Amino acid sequence: LGFSSAAADFLVAHPEEAVLFTGLAARTRDMLMAEVETDINRLGPATGLRRFRHRALFRLAARDLGGAAVEDVLSEMTAIAEVCLEAADRAVGPALTIIGMGKLGGAELNYSSDVDVIFVHPDRDSSGVVKLAVELVALLSEPTEEGVALRVDTTLRPEGRAGPVSRSMASTIEYYRRHAATWERQALLKARPVAGAVDAGSRLLDELAPIVYPDHLEPSAIDDVRHMKVRI
């Protein structure tokens, strides 16, 4: 509590959650999924997701302060975000494919990380799917009395803020084949299906592998990489 005023505020608002300190053992993804589903069934999607994420995060922080290995902490923190995305996907309707990028894709989230994602949907189900993706982001990210569940960032998607929040599989592949900048192809190095229709996500990344790992890298692409490193 001396380390985290947020944890103190959470426990003042919900003293019954102090039970989290009695069970600091590591949780598997399946265990976390069962926990968030219980909270959603009890409190509804918006409140349930937030209550779960805060409890799970403070429980993990207590274990971290107790000497848990860094790799284990990062792995479980990533799993907490993944089950929030999965539960939100189930709550809004038909399964989207959710591709984790950056630290989420690399399974190395930290306490202050945003969650970078790209949404993709089946070619046959374009109508209305973009709205579902927007609803999913709002369900996790809009502030309520319980705060936010996750800060979801979709700006790494094709065309960035100018593009649709979700694209079809065919459109996504076409974009990366014909229009993606070098940095966008580099960003796919850490891409990983994390929630929703993960099998479809794996197939998508298999299709994009030759773009991410080309047989030949043009000199202009090497220059792009150097310029990006200078900017960073």
Image: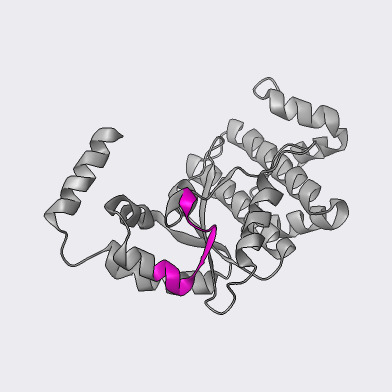
Is 70 within the magenta?
no
Is 170 within the magenta?
yes
* Left-right relation of 216 to 81: left
Residue 198 percent coordinates (x, y): 54, 69
Name the residue rendered at 51%, 54% in the picture: 117
Name the residue rendered at 87%, 37% in the picture: 16
In front: 130, or 114?
130
Q: Which residue is outermost to the bottom?
A: 124
174, above or below 62, in the image: below
- State whether residue 23 appears in this view: no
76, above or below 129, in the image: above
Write down the quadrant of residue 23 in the picture: top right
In front: 11, or 86?
86
- State whether residue 146 appears in this view: yes
Residue 207 percent coordinates (x, y): 37, 73
In front: 64, or 52?
52
Name the residue rendered at 64%, 22% in the picture: 3
131, above or below 107, in the image: below
Quarter the C terminus occupies: top left
| Number of numbered markers | 0
Query: In the rendered structure, which segment of residues is drawn in magenta?
Result: 161-173
Name the residue rendered at 73%, 41% in the picture: 55
Residue 101 percent coordinates (x, y): 46, 53
Residue 34 percent coordinates (x, y): 74, 60
